[in-house]
Image (spheres, rainbow, N blue to C red):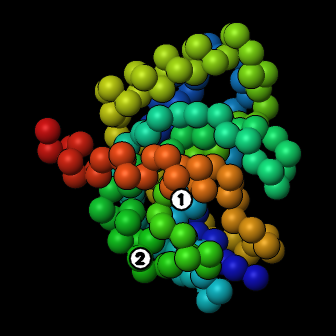
Amino acid sequence: MPYKLFVLPTDQTKEYLHKIFSELPIVIDYERLCVEIGSSLEDITPDLTRIYRALPGSIGIWYETATGRPSILLPLIPSPEMCQRREEVGDVWERQFVPYMSLTDQFNNGPKVKPRLNSIADGMVSTLPELRFSCETVLIDDAVVPAQADFYDDFLKTGLHHRPSFLELTTR
């Protein structure tokens, strides 16, 4: 069974997300938000001193075959230190590094959600707020497929080659 390394958004990042999503009729459990850094068949020692940065990608709704539910996901543009940690840990499924946050699967994908979500996505991509993550956490997972595999496959097919790097965006 793989060990999975996650990081949690800092309080400042959770407050920012709460502020921008507060008017949407969706349920986000801010205490459960996390980003998977990597996975290994060997035990991973968490480093509680590390703080990671990421920039938001374009929020979207992806359907996940394994759960039979759509989710609102926030792809992230990882900082060099986040990418370095991924290199250290690796990935059991040998995927490229595409970090994301699953915001919720509790929403009605109707006319009150989609236009507002698109507006929030546009605002985040144009302002590029720096999101921060800390508190490395390791879980043992018995999953036979990676989480959000449909998102991952779709993102690799349609978005990875268009995704700018963290350094390109922060040195403008």
User: Label 1 sits on what residue type?
Assistant: Val
Between discs 1 and 2, the one toward the N terminus:
1
**How far apart are the alpha carbons under marks 1 and 2?**
15 Å
Name the residue at 61% across, 40% down: 73
As drawn, 1 above or below 55:
below
Which labelled disc corresponds to residue 63?
none
Name the residue at 69% across, 79% down: 2
Q: Is residue 128 visible?
A: yes
As drawn, 115 above or below 154:
above
Name the residue at 75% across, 68% down: 145
x then y, percent, for residue 100 = 54, 50
Helix, strand or loop at disc 1?
Answer: strand
Helix, strand or loop at disc 2?
Answer: helix
Name the residue at 69% across, 65% down: 146
* Dot 1 alpha-carbon crowd within 10 angstroms: few under 14, some 14 to 19, many 20 or more: many
**Which quadrant would the N terminus be assigned to in this image?**
bottom right
As drawn, 11 above or below 5:
above
Q: Quadrant of residue 4?
A: bottom right
Asked whether the beta carbons under mark 1 and mark 2 sit within 8 Å of each other, the answer is no
| 113 relative position to 160: left or right | right
Q: Residue furthest front?
A: 157
Q: For marks 1 and 2, give the one nearer the viewer.
A: 2
Which labelled disc corresponds to residue 7?
1
Residue at the spot of label 2: 87
User: Label 2 sits on what residue type?
Assistant: Glu
